């Protein structure tokens, strides 16, 4: 139901754009979120957006560098990542939830993930 695209290799300071394409939409309001998991680390919250409200939330580590948005034409939640750093290297996954949460355990609808590697 969720498919991520756009991962890859970038140099420090460069940009990448990820898309989370949703097949179909559930009834009612919900949030689309991005998480990431680096090797040997726990999955962490990156950003979230209300599909209809447009409210956005960001982790402190990406605030001012990453932008989450809704693309209604593609039925996707996109994550624009600018000024990339080596510590942004991780597998990025998108997920959907009815109510906003930064806890990955609260989500039960996930994409398969896409690798982002930032080389120094």
Image (tube, grey):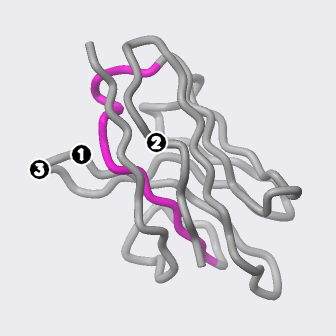
- Displayed quadrant of residue 13: top left
Q: Pick the residue in front: 107 or 10.
A: 10
Mark 3 sits on what residue?
A: 40
Q: Is residue 92 left or right of residue 30?
A: left
92 in magenta: yes
Of marks 1 and 2, the one in the foreground: 2
Q: Secondary structure at mark 1?
A: loop
Q: Position of residue 116 (x, y in %)?
A: 38, 39
Secondary structure of the residue carrying tag 2 is loop
Q: Which residue is mark 2?
A: 7
Q: Is residue 88 above or below residue 71?
A: above
Q: CA distance from mark 1 to mark 2?
A: 14 Å
**Which residue is tagged 1?**
38
Q: Which residue is pictured at 65% across the width and 35% down the height?
A: 67
Asked which quadrant contains residue 97, the reply is bottom right
Task: Please give the name of the residue rendered at 70% of the width and 76% of the height, measured from the top-left corner.
Answer: 23
Query: Where is 42 relative to 100, above or below?
Result: above
Q: Nearer the viewer, residue 67 or 59?
A: 67
Q: Which residues are magenta?
A: 84-97
Q: Quick check: 97 above or below 8?
A: below
Tell me the crowding category of disc 1: few under 14, some 14 to 19, or many 20 or more residues within 10 angstroms, Cα based. some
- The picture quadrant where one finds residue 49 is bottom right
N-term mark: 2 or 3:
2
């Amino acid at each position: 139901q969720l498919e991520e695209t756009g991962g890859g290799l970038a140099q420090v300071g460069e940009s990448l754009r990820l898309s989370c394409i949703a097949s179909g939409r559930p009834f009612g309001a919900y949030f689309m979120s991005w998480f990431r998991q680096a090797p040997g680390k726990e999955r962490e919250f990156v950003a979230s957006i209300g599909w209809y409200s447009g409210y956005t939330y960001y982790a402190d580590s990406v605030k001012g560098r990453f932008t989450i948005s809704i693309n209604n034409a593609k039925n996707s939640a996109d994550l624009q990542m600018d000024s990339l750093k080596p510590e942004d290297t991780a597998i990025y996954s998108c997920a959907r939830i009815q109510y906003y949460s930064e806890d990955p355990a609260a989500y039960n609808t996930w994409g398969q993930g896409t690798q982002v590697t930032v080389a120094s």
